[in-house]
Amino acid sequence: MEYKKKMERRPFGKSGALVPVLGQGTWQVTSHQDVVATLRRGLDLGMTHIDTAELYTGAERVVAKVIDGHRDEVYLVSKVMPENATRVGTVAACEQSLRRLRTDHLDCYLLHWNGGIHPIAACMDGMRDLVEAGKIRSVGVSNFDVREMEEAQEALGDIPLTCNQVRYNLGDRVIERDVLPWCAARGVAVVGYSPFNVGDFYMPGSREWSTLERIGQQYDATVRQVVLAFLTREPAAFAIPKASSLRHVEENADGQGIELNAEDNAVINATFPVV
């Protein structure tokens, strides 16, 4: 597949970084040669935002192989698990991730979700320590609602909350009720994971698929490219699709830059309503 466009970059919250609209997720990746090649192909195509986590067993070590020799080009994100999210535990978990990733810093470090095990403020205190030590450059959260984000930002004080990584796809648009507007108004990036509903994406031949296919024909785009265009239509929105093959990562990358018109956005809104 010939790559058509230079990857669009947007301000990533208040981090000061310009980050590709489309990045790469690494949930359940393995060290298989084809997986490493796919992620590296994504880097070549400008998808240099790579998201991983200590929870994704082995993924950080895979990412270390992928970014070897390319660290300065990559916006690297990882996450601490809730059970480790005390002040001391957050710092220790980050240091372990840095060792697995073979790097001296993360561009953004997230609390994976609020498990209710430790106070959010305790984790944010650890995040402050990491920022001050130069081990992370910005702080984010994942799977947070508005109240939780407010609590995190209050604990961070003068350090801005950079992003909230959330599940966001056409079958699950609940973040558009409160989370996305709150983030957009405060300069917080929204990073959507599972943009294709994992294995539950609408099947070819269904009414939903046919609707997206008709829209895509107007833009010389595939259904998945239409989906990514819709999910990243807001300036605060980013997406981190996971690709299982070279063909998929090339399809994802080649679809960025599509701007759906108002009529097509309205059709998608009607077909996949916010519930």
Image: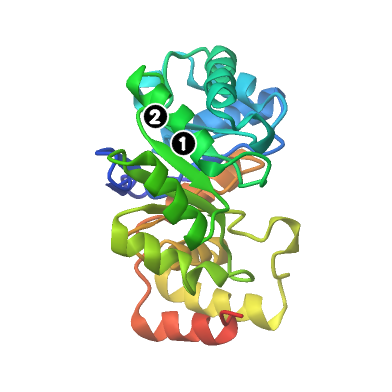
Picture coordinates of residue 136, whole percent (x, y) = 40, 25
| Amino acid at dot 1 | Met
Rendered residue at 38%/48% (across/down): 154
Rendered residue at 55%/21% (across/down): 88
| Amino acid at dot 2 | Arg
Quarter of the image containing the C terminus?
Answer: bottom right
Between 228 and 183, which is closer to the camera in this rendering?
A: 183
From what the image shows, is residue 238 above or below residue 130?
below
Within 10 Å of the Cα at label 2, are there few (<14), some (14-19), or many (20+) other Cα atoms? many
Q: Are marks 2 and 1 in contact (CB under 8 Å)?
A: yes
Between 23 and 106, which is closer to the camera in this rendering?
A: 106
The residue that disc 1 covers is 124
SS at badge 1: helix
Q: Which numbered circle lies on residue 128?
A: 2
Rendered residue at 36%/25% (across/down): 131
From what the image shows, is residue 32 above or below residue 7?
above
From what the image shows, is residue 67 above or below residue 199?
above
